[in-house]
Amino acid sequence: MQYPCIFVLSTCVLLRRYGAILLQFNEDLSEIDVVRIPEIYEELVAAFNSIEKKIQLLKDTLSVPLFMMLISGFLNFYASISNYYLPEFAPHLVLEAVCNALTGVVIITSLTLCSSKVPENMLKIKKTFGELIEKYQLMKNSEKEIYFLERLEKRDVIYLTAWDIIYFKKTFLLSAFGAVFTYGLIIVHLR
């Protein structure tokens, strides 16, 4: 990957688009009149299933590329640390080390933040389903519609992964930069 930031940017744009689709679905859900649920519940289930299939396809498609881009980000970090071991640390090497480190920060941070938006938006949808259930139960209508809403609310959130090894959550940033800092200290103290 000669231009990792371009790959990361295009991936983030794609993930942002999927996040926008989820937010639009959530907005549509929140605007539903509770009285109309019996009329449209099959349509709701079909729409949610379609979105869930697309997110699963996105997860399966991006799993390996996300892993490769993440590895590229970490390697950029370690390349900047390795410049510390050169016998002569010339000014142009300092610039290269800083650029490598910044590239690593941009890659890891953007991938994590963009990838974590999809499950966050799915959690918002689950919350909206919960609110619909509460409103509908207050009306004391039939159990059939409640059952389908509860089923949709209980579905698992799909987290984007890097080769099913790393789950992209915002908490991953702390782990990633902690590992880079720790290994950086080890490498620096080996000298």
Image: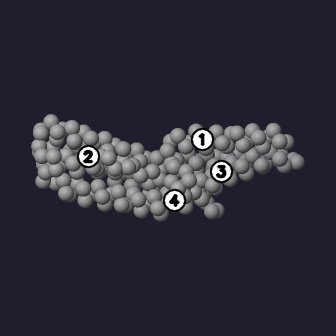
Assess whether mark 1 and mark 2 are in contact (beta carbons under 8 angstroms): no
How far from the left and from the top, in percent, is residue 91?
80, 46
Marks 1 and 3 sit apart, C-alpha to C-alpha, by 12 Å
Assess whether mark 4 and mark 2 are in contact (beta carbons under 8 angstroms): no
Please name the residue that numbered disc 1 is placed on.
175
Mark nearest the camera among 1 and 3 is 1
Residue 150 is marked as: 2
Residue type highlighted by circle 4: Ser
| Viewer-nearest residue: 119 or 81 | 119
Residue type highlighted by circle 1: Ser
Marks 2 and 3 sit apart, C-alpha to C-alpha, by 41 Å
Could you tell me which secondary element the residue under label 3 belongs to? helix
Marks 2 and 1 sit apart, C-alpha to C-alpha, by 34 Å
Residue 63 is marked as: 4
Could you tell me which secondary element the residue under label 4 belongs to? helix
Reading the chain from its start, which is encountered first: label 1 or label 4?
Answer: 4
Instruction: Write down the quadrant of residue 66 in the picture.
Output: bottom right
Residue type highlighted by circle 3: Phe
Assess whether mark 3 and mark 1 are in contact (beta carbons under 8 angstroms): no
How far from the left and from the top, in percent, is residue 162?
54, 55
Q: Is residue 128 visible?
A: yes
Please name the residue that numbered disc 3 is placed on.
74
Image position of 118 (left or right of 64): left
Residue appearing at x 31%, y 41% in the figure: 127
Residue appearing at x 12%, y 39% in the figure: 140
Q: Is residue 125 visible?
A: no
Could you tell me which secondary element the residue under label 2 belongs to? helix
How far from the left and from the top, in percent, is residue 44?
23, 54
